[in-house]
Amino acid sequence: MSGMTIDLRRFSINTATLGYQAPLSDTIEAVARAGFGGISPWRREVENENAPGLARQIRAAGLQVSGYCRSTCFPGASKREWLANVEDNKMALRFAAELGTKCFVLVVGALPPGSRSLPDARQQVADGIAALLADAQALGVSLAIEPLHPMYAADRACVNTIEQALELCALLDPHATGRLGVAIDVYHTWWDPKVHDMMARTASEGRLLAFHVNDWLVPTADILMDRGLPGEGVIDLGALTNSALDAGYDGLFELEVFSSRIWRLSVSEILELSSRACLSITRPKEGRLNSAT
């Protein structure tokens, strides 16, 4: 499709894309040098470090923090386990606030050991998110529910469609306070016949907090560790990103690629490939190009 390139500053790098090869302080500088507009770090890179210092470095580098990954799964085999998971997520929220992140990404979890009850798991998820909302409000951090592909319904997330995530938002945050929304990852949602309608609904309700880009390879060698960079697979990324922009999404497009193949490369090589891949996603000539600042 002939069109206009989206400004690279409109893209953020999720640090998982780089394979955790370097300390976060080094990664921040590398991402900024490569020309991206944001970064989304993982807890493993932050929780034993000086989070306020990292936040200052990120701001000084001219980057936004598009997200903070990710929650501990909520469901537990016992009430004690559930409470421990909630408390762990409350701790993570404090780090998210120190970083100044736009949202804390919730990968909600699924069946705890020994369970076959998805309804029970979903209730534990709803109760867990409800238990975080007061802290999120007090800290000024939004919670972004990330629906995962149905292949993860047993072990990673029992919320598998954007529509499910929006139903949870309406239940737990009926007044749309801005503290509960959705992180849409195209890897998990591209297959959904309702994806464009649900994306528009999410944005219209003010709940589109994050948008992750990557690609689905055919064949896929591993359901977790074989994502593609944009343009390597079969997802119509132009159509999906354009839907987000048309719906009024004004945030960053976050590149999140788990790939054992790509992780064999150096950070600089991955960033170079990532830059080219992001710039391959085009906007129709008549479309808007809103550069994030």
Image (cartoon, grey):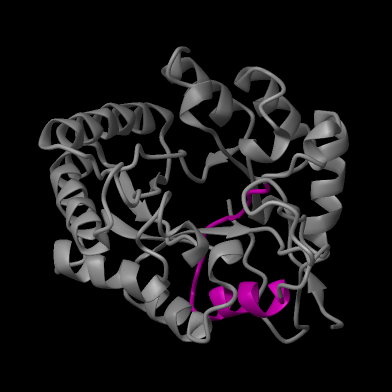
Residue at 71% of width from left, 77% of height from top? Answer: 236
Q: What stretch is highlighted in magenta?
A: 236-257
Residue at 15% of width from left, 33% of height from top? Answer: 83
Q: Is residue 153 magenta?
A: no
- Image x and y of residue 223, in percent: 63, 54
Residue 197 against residue 261 in the figure, above or below: below
Q: Quadrant of residue 285?
A: bottom right
- Image x and y of residue 71, in percent: 37, 39
**Foreground pick, 139 / 263:** 263
Residue at 82% of width from left, 57% of height from top? Answer: 277
Q: In which quarter of the image is residue 214?
A: bottom right
**Foreground pick, 229 / 25:** 229
Left or right placement of residue 109 versus residue 173 in this view: right
Q: Quadrant of residue 80?
A: top left
Asked if residue 196 shows in the view, the reply is: yes
**Foreground pick, 226 / 174:** 226
The number of discs equals 0
Quadrant of image for the N terminus: bottom right
Left or right placement of residue 202 versus residue 252 in this view: left
Residue at 47% of width from left, 12% of height from top? Answer: 49
- Image x and y of residue 25, in percent: 63, 19
Residue 260 against residue 99 in the figure, above or below: below
Asked if residue 206 shows in the view, the reply is: no
Left or right placement of residue 114 versus residue 246 in this view: left
